[in-house]
Amino acid sequence: AVQAVGAGGHIEVLDGSAAHTSWVRHEGWSTENGFVDSNLMTDFENLRSEVTNALVFVSTDPLVEVEDLLCLLDAAAVAKRPIAIIAPNASEAVLKAAILNHQGGTAKIALCCMPKASEEDFHDCAIACGCFATKVESVRRVSDVTCLLGSATKVTQTMDSTVLSGTAEVNARVRLLKERIDRALSEDQKEVLRARMAKLTRTFAVIRVGGRTIVEIGESKDRVVDALNASRNALADGIVAGGGAALVHACKRLDAMLNDNEDLEQDRRMGIMIVRNAAKLPARLIGDNAGVEGAVVVGNLEDLDDTAMGYGAQNDRYVNMFDEGIVDPVKVVRSCLNDAASVAGLRSEER
């Protein structure tokens, strides 16, 4: 999934409804709201609905009046094209009318209700399809309804999702979202904006974590999120040998700094020694937990010239960590060092 969307994409992790875990990349703007009634399906065998070359109407208001729906269906019938209607909700009368016209052959209808979506989501959907997110009352106020309609090459609906492959250019909207991401203060705001941008650029994927019980799904979901974060960090800045090996090899530069600078101030020399000893600690603890002498493991790693080599605790041997898949994202290792140094600085100031 991470490879499919790339470093700039977004992956959402959701609870699945099956025993197995699955993922899908959406080829278009998407929402995790499926078809509202099984009678609107076009493929009963696969429990999905799919229409091509569809007109698109996006409303920020619920569809309440049947007359509004009939105006949209008339435009679709004249154009001899199916129509996708996106709204926060639809009344029972509107739903019944949609089913009757869908089954009667007036026009194929893809109806999607998004009760929890923000107004910005509706605007994103409209921009992707080349129209505006309007009020429902606009349908009866204009002489030609087609001015309110966008277009999509394909609209696909399942029980869990709706995907619209819009035909409009979205570069301007994407640039606006990038600017808002740069100005956002909290990480939560940035995450929401990244998801919106990924939907417009078609680099959005969903992982549905399955399981037999709620407890199993929760545990599996936590593991998927951890793996996903590690993969994102690895794509962003690369990877290094895991198991503390990269830190031990990096300490060789600190040793060289101490040996080559005899005139180094005592405070700086002490600081370098503290960082060096702390950086060797992860590999030492791994060795101790594996039942061997941790100090010996660190010493052996220091004697190795190949920085890809590390200690494989599971088999008690020194291996190429990249070949064995024992790696850490650079971003994670760097963050650990920065955070540890920051906390150490605070403690020293308190003293």
Image (cartoon, helix red, strand yellow):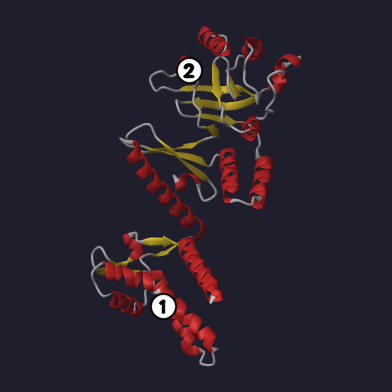
Rendered residue at 33%/37% (across/down): 211
Name the mark on residue 327: none
Dot 2 lies on which element?
A: loop
Residue in the picture at 60% in, 31% down = 166
Earlier residue among tags 1 and 2: 2
Name the residue that disc number 2 marks. 37
Q: CA distance from mark 1 to mark 2?
A: 64 Å
Check the image and report above or below for 288 versus 167: below
Tell me the element at label 1: helix
Q: Residue at x 56, y 38 (%)?
A: 199
Q: Position of residue 94 (x, y in %)?
A: 58, 13
- In-image side of 6 versus 71 (left or right): left
Q: Mark 2 Cα within 10 Å, few/some/many (few <14, many 20+)?
A: some
Say whether residue 68 is left or right of residue 249.
right
Residue 328's image quarter?
A: bottom left
Residue farthest along the front direction in this orientation: 351
- Amino acid, disc 2: Asp
Q: Please provide percent x and percent y for residue 226.
A: 42, 51
- Asked if 46 appears above or below 10 in the picture, the reply is above
Q: Which mark is residue 277?
A: 1
Q: Is residue 120 visible?
A: yes
Inspect the image, locate mark 1, and give the three-letter code of the amino acid beneath it: Asn
Residue in the picture at 32% in, 34% down: 19
